[in-house]
């Protein structure tokens, strides 16, 4: 087993640059495809494509949310865009004349895009952020690998439980014809029928046994268990393949439930469905 990752993880880091400090948060959750969302300060929009490229080199599936915030230090200088500030003032005056109860603080005005103009070249800051971001993605993948290993342990445990269920099915397969004969004979005894065509009886027994025969489903589930373990052993990007295998498992369990000729098989079919659903829930978190 190698490199099986969960799509669910969280990592964060803090860094320093010449003009400010910064915080980076990365969160990933399960998704059918790769979906990347950034929340960046206005001054850093230009690095989004570079960050996306870094992520795509390490993450192939899942919903990724990245948030970067800045904490300005004493070296961060800026000036006010006075033209925009006066325009805002005029617009605020007009609004307050129409809606007197609205209040606006100086902070609200300063946070308006374009009011505060910095005097810095953000290339150095961008370089520092991309370096920290690359390291953070590596950390995130370590967490995803750790979580993936835990999920695989759970899946293996459920596969073992499925094998236990198959033992009950195997016991029923070995004496299927005799059990059907006993059921028919019990019905005949209740009806007090003493004389019956032996050939006709054997034909009905064989027909019922054929309808309730789940040997093929039993063999296919055993084959699915083997294939699933091979996929896990191979590792890598296996989430979609394992999800497909769960569909195949579920198809066989449904057929067994439909063919069930006694309560033991019915109970096993229900337990199989529960186990398969539990595995499917874990598989959907794998990349």
Image (cartoon, rainbow, N blue to C red):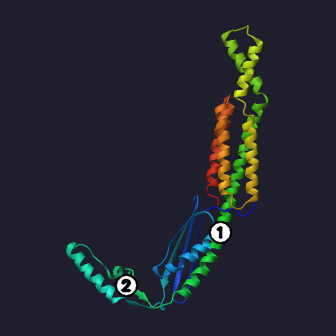
Front: mark 2 or 1? 2
48 sits left or right of 199 in the view: left
Furthest-right residue in this view: 174
Question: Is residue 183 shown left or right of residue 64?
Answer: right
> Which label's residue is closer to the chain start, 2 or 1?
2
Q: Is residue 203 above or below residue 248?
A: above
Identify which residue is drawn at 62% across, 47% down: 277
Residue count near mark 2 (Cα–Cα under 10 Å), binned few <14, some 14–19, many ≥20: some
Badge 1 is on which residue? 141
Query: Quarter-wise, where is residue 55 in the image?
Result: bottom right
> Dot 1: few (<14), some (14–19), or many (≥20) neighbours within 10 Å?
many
Q: Position of residue 269 (x, y in %)?
A: 66, 37
Residue 12 appears in the figure = no
At which x and y percent is residue 278? 63, 48
Say which element carries label 2: loop
**Horizontal placement of 10 versus 142: left or right?**
left
Q: Is there a contact, CB below 8 Å, between mark 2 and mark 1?
A: no
Q: Give the quadrant of the N terminus.
A: bottom right
Residue 82 in which image quadrant: bottom left
Up the image or down, 144 lies above or below 162; here it is below
Residue 8 at x, y percent in the picture? 60, 62
Relative vertical location of residue 122 with respect to residue 247 in this rendering, above or below: below
* Residue depicted at 23% across the width and 80% down the height: 93
What x and y, as percent, mark residue 109?
A: 34, 81
Which mark is drawn over residue 201?
Answer: none
Disc assigned to residue 115: 2
Q: Residue at x 79, y 30 (%)?
A: 174
Which secondary structure, mark 1?
helix
Q: From this viewpoint, which residue is outermost toward the left?
A: 97
């Amino acid at each position: 087993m190698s490199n099986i990752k969960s799509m669910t993880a969280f990592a964060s880091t803090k860094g320093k640059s010449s003009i400010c400090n910064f915080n980076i948060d990365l969160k990933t959750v399960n998704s059918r495809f790769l979906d990347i969302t950034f929340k960046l300060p206005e001054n850093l929009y230009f690095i989004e494509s570079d960050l996306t490229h870094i992520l795509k080199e390490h993450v192939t599936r899942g919903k990724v949310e990245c948030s970067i915030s800045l904490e300005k230090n004493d070296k961060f200088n800026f000036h006010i865009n006075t033209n925009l500030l006066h325009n805002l003032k005029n617009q605020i005056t007009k609004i307050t004349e129409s809606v007197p109860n609205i209040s606006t603080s100086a902070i609200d005005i300063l946070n308006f895009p374009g009011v505060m103009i910095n005097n810095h070249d953000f290339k150095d800051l961008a370089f520092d952020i991309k370096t920290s971001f690359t390291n953070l993605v590596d950390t995130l993948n370590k967490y995803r690998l750790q979580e993936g290993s835990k999920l695989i342990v759970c899946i293996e445990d459920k596969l073992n439980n499925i094998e236990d269920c198959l033992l009950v099915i195997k016991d029923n397969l070995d004496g299927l014809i005799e059990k059907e004969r006993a059921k028919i004979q019990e019905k005949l005894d209740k009806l007090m029928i003493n004389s019956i065509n032996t050939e006709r009886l054997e034909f009905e027994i064989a027909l019922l046994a054929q309808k309730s025969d789940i040997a093929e489903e039993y063999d296919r589930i055993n084959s699915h268990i083997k294939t699933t373990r091979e996929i896990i052993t191979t590792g890598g990007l296996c989430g979609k393949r394992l999800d497909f295998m769960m569909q195949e498992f579920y198809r066989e369990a449904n057929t067994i439930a439909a063919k069930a000729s006694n309560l033991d098989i019915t109970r096993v079919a229900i337990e199989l469905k529960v186990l398969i659903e539990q595995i499917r829930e874990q598989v959907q978190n794998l990349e």
